[in-house]
Amino acid sequence: MSFGDAPGKAILFGEHSVVYDRPAIAVPVRQIRASAKIEDIRGAAPGQVRIVAPQTGVDSWLETCDPGHPLARIVLLTLEELRTKDFPSIKIHITSSIPIAAGLGSGAAVSVAITRAICAHFHAELPLERQSVLAFEVEKLHHGTPSGIDNAVVTYDQPVYFVKGREPEPFHIANPFLLLIGDTGVESPTAEAVSLVRRRWQEDPHRLEALFDAIGDTARSGRAAIESGQTFDLGPLMNHNQSLLEAIGVSSAELNWLIQTARGAGALGAKLSGAGLGGNMIALVDHESVERVEIALRRGGARSVLLTEVAP
Ligand code: PMV
């Protein structure tokens, strides 16, 4: 049996504006993971692949799958990359504790987990950079113009400062800090939010470009605060990033409610994380406020609340 996995992720600063070439910061969320297990299938003709993903109702042979299906695509891309043919038939079993369409990087993590399991099964090494490139190809199926931030952070499994088209930059975290991640329970496919922003940008490019610039500034200042250990500065920056995302139109009543609830219970800052319109929000907390904010989020209707530490 061979195994591969990858973590979820949260975006600390810069979602959406990162699609328009501004910087963003993303962090891995290691408590939630996508996993893939591979075993040989005895008695099947060589080179056959059965893909089983019970959570999304998939149980198909690769050759009968639509090659544009994200699971089929990552399997095909990885086999092609490894130039593997005529191998004993395999079954790939995929599970994930990362909620789907919730802004936590589920699609990218599933892709990377599958690539890693296939590499492990065929005793092949694939550099992180290539793993990320293959997952990026699949991200394009989810919404035509991905920035690449999701595949980068889940592959490198460390906080990254990211600018589209460049190598992700891991950076120094002077003081670890705590984030609570609250789920609105509202599914929000990334493609919808991304195309809403595209329409707004086409209607009023000057306004949107200015908002993107301001969001890019929060990512730059956020990085400086994290590198210098001024973690308390992150809260106001997150709040400012949230008001800019609201001005773009990608927040929602449920997100706003959880964000206000977290701030009211003592969070140092809070914002949506990921594409928005639903999905998850994040709140910066310290050791004094963490329990109060967690309880408030649960009472406020969060479907789940996760605590994660951002550390080197
Ligand atoms: O996949 P999500 O929901 O975490 O959104 C990714 C972040 C976006 O900036 C909205 C899109 C992108 O490709 O960067």
Image (cartoon, grey):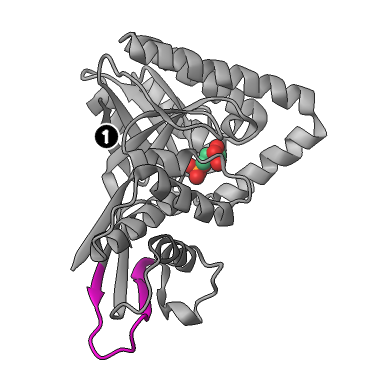
Taking depth in this image into account, of 288 and 78 the one nearest to the observer is: 78
Task: Give the residue displayed 52% in from the left and 67% down from the top.
Answer: 69
- The furthest residue to the right: 203
| Numbered range of the magenta stretch | 38-55
Q: Quadrant of the N terminus?
A: bottom left
Task: Give the residue displayed 53% in from the left and 25% down from the top.
Answer: 23
Q: Position of residue 127 (x, y in %)?
A: 34, 46
Q: Position of residue 94 (x, y in %)?
A: 32, 65
Residue of label 1:
307
- The answer to if 296 sits in the magenta stretch is no
Examine the rendering and report whether any part of residue 162 can be seen: yes
Task: Give the residue displayed 41% in from the left and 74% down from the top.
Answer: 58
Q: Amino acid at mark 1?
A: Leu
Name which quarter of the figure residue 118 lies in.
Answer: bottom left
Q: Position of residue 86 (x, y in %)?
A: 35, 79
Taking depth in this image into account, of 220 and 263 the one nearest to the observer is: 220
SS under mark 1: strand
Q: Position of residue 108 (x, y in %)?
A: 43, 50
Q: Is residue 50 left or right of residue 207?
A: left
Q: Is residue 212 left or right of residue 256?
A: right
Task: Give the residue displayed 64% in from the left and 24% down from the top.
Answer: 212
Vertically, is 263 above or below 196?
A: above
Vertically, is 58 above or below 175?
A: below
